[in-house]
Amino acid sequence: MEKKPLQDANLAVGYVAKRSDVNVSTLHFYETKGLIRSWRNDGNQRRYKPDVLRRIAVIKAAQKMGVTLEEIKLTLDTLPQSRTPNKNDWARLSTQWQAQLDEKIAYMQRLRARVEGCIGCGCLSMSSCPLYNPNDILGEAHSGAVLLEKD
């Protein structure tokens, strides 16, 4: 039996899951979110085109950078005819997501610099609270760690 070239293949859900290192349920979830597409064969089984592997790789890479599935979908929807990103697309997408990652890193660095001295929530239990939050003035207008959220 002659083997079909990968670009012509109709990939089964189990193969895609294994090859992408995700659970089958993850593929179904991605599909419900509109991140990937499949169709049903005559036996009512899901089938995928091989480019879904690249699409899933993009999704996983973006998630590792902290990009939400909603943001990933919005970005992928900007591609013509919802096609799978090519090398140039990836350069553009990753640059955009790198900017988001840089913002998150800067936020975490600010948080790390502040967390040692005060938890920032108006708890009045630390000796520095009278300096940062005398008489719990922050508690009148806000709740939570408001000092840590300030720029």
Image (cartoon, helix red, strand yellow):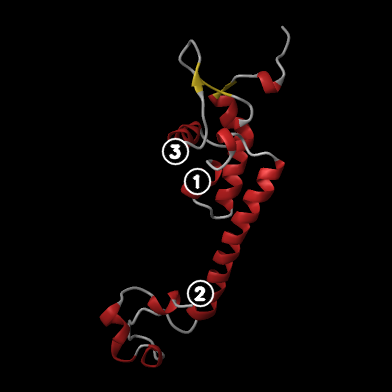
Q: Where is 32 relative to 113, above or below?
A: above
1 or 2: mark nearer the eye = 1
Q: Nearer the viewer, residue 92 or 30?
A: 92
Of pointers 1 and 3, the one earlier in the residue sequence: 3
Classify the position of the N terminus by image quarter. Answer: top right
Residue 55 picture location, percent across and down: 60, 37
Name the amino acid, label 3: Lys
Q: Secondary structure at mark 1?
A: helix
Mark 2–mark 3 distance (CA, rounded to whole Å) = 32 Å
Kindly indicate whether the residue at mark 3 contacts the one at mark 1 (C-beta within 8 angstroms): no
Q: Nearer the viewer, residue 90 or 80?
A: 80
Residue 42 picture location, percent across and down: 49, 10
Residue beneath disc 2: 111
Name the amino acid, label 2: Leu
Q: Residues within 10 Å of mark 1 (few under 14, many from 20)?
A: few
Is residue 83 rendered to the left or right of residue 144?
A: right
Label placed on residue 33: 3
Q: Going by the picture, which residue comes out furthest to the front?
A: 80
Q: Where is 12 relative to 144, above or below?
A: above
Is residue 48 rendered to the left or right of residue 92?
A: left
Label placed on residue 74: 1
